[in-house]
Image: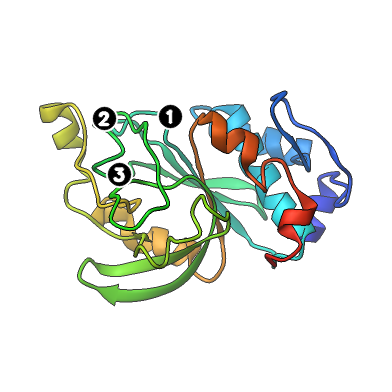
């Protein structure tokens, strides 16, 4: 992964500004960003740039490399295909599909996010996919939140990727939104195994929404070295 980023012209320790004036982070490698933008034109380029920059910040502070990246854009409605999974080595798009948000995050639009137990809300920020397992929802994937105070209670909250029958485009047509979870990024049963297999074992997951407190305070989006030094 690091060799790939170098091949795309990224200086691993170079500090620079992102397009957003709120954020100062390690820049996403421009050729990689351009390639993935072409592969996923429905994904806002700035969201993708933030995802790559947050991932690069983690790598620059000692996180192990990854081969794939999932991006969830919670600014899009639940009726939209707002989950993207990228192969960073090729680079290419592997999947663009539906994903649920927590029932207390909103109706069709998610607007509220939390790191609190039993909040039934989704969480923002950078995650690492961990181990797969078989549970009450079948083949599922645990996630570890990397951002203190933002998503670092994901494992404690049992925030996992799992299949859910309510992630169904027919529901979107009949009720104006898909079903909602207890905070998990649930996916369609038809793609759940592929999603788990592509992400398990340490791939990155980035969940985005234009929440100003998070944008200004995120350790990864702002690449705060002092705060990150003890996390990896």
Read off the residue under disc 1.
75
Mark 1 or mark 2, earlier in chain: 1
Colour basis: rainbow
Q: Quadrant of the C terminus?
A: bottom right
Q: Position of residue 117 (x, y in %)?
A: 34, 58
Q: Residues within 10 Å of mark 2 (few under 14, many from 20)?
A: many
Reading the image, the residue beneath label 3 is 100
Residue 2 placement: quadrant: bottom right
Which residue is most to the left? 174
In the image, 1: left or right of 162? right
First in sequence, mark 1 or 3: give its number.
1
Residue drawn at (24%, 43%) of the image: 103
In the figure, is residue 71 to the left or right of 178?
right
Q: CA distance from mark 1 to mark 2?
A: 10 Å
**Viewer-nearest residue: 75 or 44:** 75
* Tag of residue 108: 2
Label 1 neighbour load within 10 Å: few <14, some 14-19, many 20+ = some
The alpha-carbon separation of the residues under discs 2 and 3 comes to: 10 Å
Asked whether residue 38 appears in the rendered view, the answer is: no
Label 1 secondary element: loop
Mark 1 touching mark 2, by CB under 8 A? no
């Amino acid at each position: 992964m690091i060799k790939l980023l170098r091949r795309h012209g990224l200086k691993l320790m170079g500090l620079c500004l992102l397009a957003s004036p709120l954020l100062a982070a390690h820049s996403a490698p421009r050729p990689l960003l351009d390639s993935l933008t072409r592969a996923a034109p429905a994904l806002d380029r700035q969201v993708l740039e933030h995802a790559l920059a947050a991932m690069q910040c983690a790598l620059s502070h000692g996180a192990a490399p990854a081969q794939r990246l999932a991006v969830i854009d919670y600014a899009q409605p639940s009726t939209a295909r707002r989950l993207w999974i990228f192969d960073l080595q090729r680079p290419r798009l592997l999947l663009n599909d539906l994903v649920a948000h927590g029932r207390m995050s909103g109706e069709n639009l998610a607007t509220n996010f939390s790191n609190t137990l039993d909040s039934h809300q989704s969480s923002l920020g950078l995650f690492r996919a961990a181990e797969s397992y078989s549970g009450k929802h079948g083949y599922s994937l645990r996630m570890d939140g990397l951002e203190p105070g933002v998503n670092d209670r994901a494992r404690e909250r049992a925030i996992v990727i799992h299949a859910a029958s309510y992630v169904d485009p027919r529901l979107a047509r009949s009720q104006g939104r898909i079903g909602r979870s207890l905070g998990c990024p649930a996916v369609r049963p038809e793609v759940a195994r592929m999603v788990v297999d592509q992400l398990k074992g340490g791939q990155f997951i980035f969940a985005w929404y234009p929440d100003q407190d998070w944008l200004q305070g995120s350790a990864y989006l702002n690449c705060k070295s002092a705060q990150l030094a003890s996390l990896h």
